[in-house]
Image: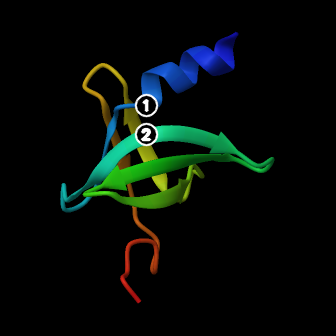
């Protein structure tokens, strides 16, 4: 199955900011609730759900295990 194959290569990828190279964590799961994939990213025990939309996910390189994103406002804010 192509979907399972794709998810297998995404899990374990580091999620980093495309502009600043700030690391946001690692993908620990890939969820889908209909409209798009959602990357469950964990950093220091905290989970953040990142919608895998073209506005946010800018580059995926499974060879180097890196997903580069353009974080939308509020995605990683504490408040």
Q: Position of residue 26 (x, y in %)?
A: 33, 43
Q: Nearer the viewer, residue 13 or 62?
A: 13
Residue 4 visible? The answer is: yes
In primary-sequence order, the first of circles 1 and 2 is 1
Q: Position of residue 61 (x, y in %)?
A: 35, 29
Q: Position of residue 38 (x, y in %)?
A: 59, 49
Residue at 35% across / 32% down in the picture?
A: 12
Residue 16 visible? The answer is: no
Residue at 43% across / 59% down in the picture?
A: 47
Q: Position of residue 72 (x, y in %)?
A: 46, 71
Residue at 81% across / 47% down in the picture?
A: 34
Report if the CB atoms under discs 1 and 2 are less than 8 Å apart.
yes
* Residue 26 horizontal side relative to residue 54, left or right: left
- Up/down of 76 relative to 62, above or below: below
Label 2 secondary element: strand
Real-space Cα distance between discs 1 and 2?
A: 5 Å
Image disc number at residue 11: 1
Q: Nearer the viewer, residue 63 or 77?
A: 77
Label 1 secondary element: loop
Residue occupied by mark 2: 28
């Amino acid at each position: 199955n192509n979907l399972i194959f794709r998810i297998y290569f995404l899990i374990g990828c580091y999620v980093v900011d495309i502009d600043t190279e700030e690391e946001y964590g690692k993908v620990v799961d890939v969820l889908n609730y209909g409209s798009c994939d959602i990357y469950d990213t964990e950093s220091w025990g905290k989970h953040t759900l990142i919608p895998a939309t073209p506005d946010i996910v800018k580059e995926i390189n499974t060879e180097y295990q890196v997903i580069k994103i353009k974080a939308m406002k509020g995605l990683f804010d504490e408040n």
